Image: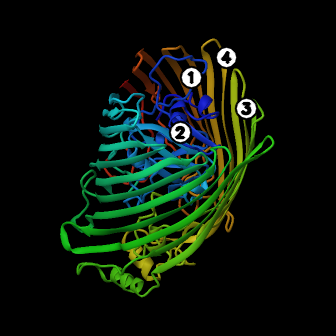
Amino acid sequence: MKTSILSAAVALTAASPAFAAEGHEQSPDTIVVTAPRLTATDAASEADEELSTGPDGAAFIARQPGAALVANGALSGQVQMRGLFGERILLRINGQRFATGGPNAMDPAMHYAPMMLIDRVEIARGISPVRDGPGLGGGVNTVLKHARFGTGSSLSPQIDLSSQYRSVDDSVAMGGLVALASDSLRLGVIGSYEAGDDTRFPGGRIGSTSFHRAVYGVHAGFRAGPGEFSLEYRRQDTGRSGNPPFAMDIVYFHTDFARAGFEGDLDDNLRLEVHASYTGVSHRMNNYELRPAPTTALTRQSDTYADTIGADASLRFGSAGRHIRIGADFELIDKGYMLYNPLSPAFFIHPLDRAKSDRVGGYVEWRNGFGAIESELGLRIDRHGASTGTSRYGPGVPAGPVNLANAFALADRNWSGTSVDASLRLWADMGAFTPRLTLAHKTRAPSLIERYSWLPTEASGGLADGNIYVGDVHLKIEKAWIAELGFDWQGDNAYTRPVVYYRRIDDFIQGVPFDTTPGIVNTPVEIVSNGSGDPTPLRFANTDARIWGADIAFGAKIVGPLRLDGVASYVRAERTDIADNLYRMAPANARLAVSWAQSRWSISIEGQFVARQTRVSVTNSEAPSAGHVLANIAGYWVIRDGIRLDLGIENLFDTCYREHLAGYNRITGTDVPLGARLPGAGRSAFARIRWAM
């Protein structure tokens, strides 16, 4: 949840000053959202900030035009961008890609970006550049706080610390950066801690929404001539945290990140960038510690792991505005999980056992101009591979799952394929007016869960629709044809950026009925699924789909320090092989904020308007949702340069509402009925203070 949308005014027209100062290169269609400022500025031109009070870093992004939050738990939210979410969005932390540890994506990428540590978020709303890797939709790179090089030869301290309290869940958060830096060396330590109780809503409390998370890490950079060597290590320990839309809750995530790199100019028109990274995730979840315990026979716990090794290298020939870039990258993933009954040692089974995927890719990008028209053309080719071992199981596993495991052992469990991505961006700088056109062909390879889930379970990569799924070893690569058209207009006292877009997606991976006779339990898969309470399991399959819509950001200075800012989004998504809608699509929505901003303080009143959603997926048994209107009020005071206090109230009138993208409650004995869509948070006051020097 956030309390300001003023970021659009500057973020839509240029990179943030912090970003530009570091010399990094971004795509011309990238939005940069930064943390709140800490110094007095000209209020008429200052708008490069966002404040988010919830622990989920995905909410920091969700208020941007075209974006939405898929709420799967306090720490498990996923980013939806123009109708796509999950692995279809290219998500990175500090430029690092990695596989999530949970089979239901309880740890999506933004799980590893606590709000206390976010420095900025770089958002490619439409398509991600080919240099960032394959991906069907937009891209997000979240940059955590880090030491910056100083201006002198001696080491000087850098401090950026924040602390926050929020009433709706009695949560506390604290963290930040402590560093030493000179003009050639930077050394930094980051850390954060967050904890919260169950979230309140007008009808009571939402069970199993408490959370605990701690992050700590070190990083360093050394300038050698025109380049920089960098090294970072980060550890995240997520404790017991609830996930009411899922069958289990988080017991822990223990995750290690390591990355090393070099970036520098080898010559006047030759730049080299090289990085290598590792991510290791260890995860446990169960269905009895944070929710009422089931019977002994139904007690379940799951241990999972995911290891990712990656590297990339690129050479840029030319300047930042006129160049050819060639590069290559690879990614190796090792993933698996075991499901067991901790009260019955003989019952254990590996639904995903020693599964591996690999990808090797290369690309070329050409940035050029023809008169007033600027262009960026990109092409990449990737070779993918995937495999998995035969599944192990214990003597206490019933005959049905054993027979499925033995049948899967006889299947062809090795796959390889090639994908081709291409993109063309055109824009023209015509003073206050900049028209934009994007054409692209983008791809996504099936996930290990989608391909190799032979056991009927609710593992679905975070769909949280209550259905049981199985995979398909014959899945094809998704392929999308994309067109976007829009413009930026920046006047002296107003701005706007409308975009319309269309995507045709061939071989879109979607759950479909397992066979042609759904509801008739006549196959081994349906028999096992029926034993778990779902006689109509779904099977991941290639279908066809299309997504289209529009979004806009706008704002204007009304009079003096009074200004108006807003965003609005609309997306429509449907299957084209049958008459059905795609699952979990954000309804039409808008936000409008009126702000009075002085050089050292500001107050803002915001309205959030969400339409009802009746275009739902019949295949996924999706329920429609009603519309709602919320009001927020917030303000800040820069007490002195480097110290800022934020205060506010979210959901000012304590409205009871249900977000369409929230999951369905799976927990008994709470104030939310079993199977009902989870309500949004009630009235919440917050206070945050930040100190930086």
Q: Dot 4, crowdedness within 10 Å: few (<14), some or many (≥20)? A: some
Separation (CA) of disc 4 from disc 2: 35 Å
Q: Dot 1, crowdedness within 10 Å: few (<14), some or many (≥20)? A: some
Q: Nearer the viewer, residue 327 or 298?
A: 327
Check disc 3 and give the amino acid type: Trp
Residue in view at x 42 percent, y 88 percent: 410
Name the secondary structure under disc 1: loop
* Image colouring: rainbow
Q: Does label 4 or label 3 sit earlier along the sequence?
A: 3
Give the residue at the far right of this rendering.
371
Residue 46's disc number: 1
Give the residue at the far bottom of this rendering.
410
Check disc 4 and give the amino acid type: Ile
Separation (CA) of disc 3 from disc 1: 17 Å
Q: Does label 1 or label 4 sit earlier along the sequence?
A: 1
Name the secondary structure under disc 4: strand
Q: Name the residue under label 4.
A: 558
Q: Does label 1 or label 2 sit earlier along the sequence?
A: 2
Q: Does label 3 or label 1 sit earlier along the sequence?
A: 1
Mark toward the viewer: 3 or 2: 2
Name the secondary structure under disc 3: strand
Q: Dot 3, crowdedness within 10 Å: few (<14), some or many (≥20)? A: some
Q: In this view, does 691 lie above or below 28?
A: above
Q: Name the residue under label 3.
A: 489
Q: Is residue 322 left or right of residue 294?
A: right
Name the secondary structure under disc 2: loop
Q: Does label 4 or label 2 sit earlier along the sequence?
A: 2
Separation (CA) of disc 4 from disc 3: 17 Å
Separation (CA) of disc 3 from disc 2: 26 Å
Mark toward the viewer: 1 or 4: 1
Separation (CA) of disc 1 from disc 4: 15 Å
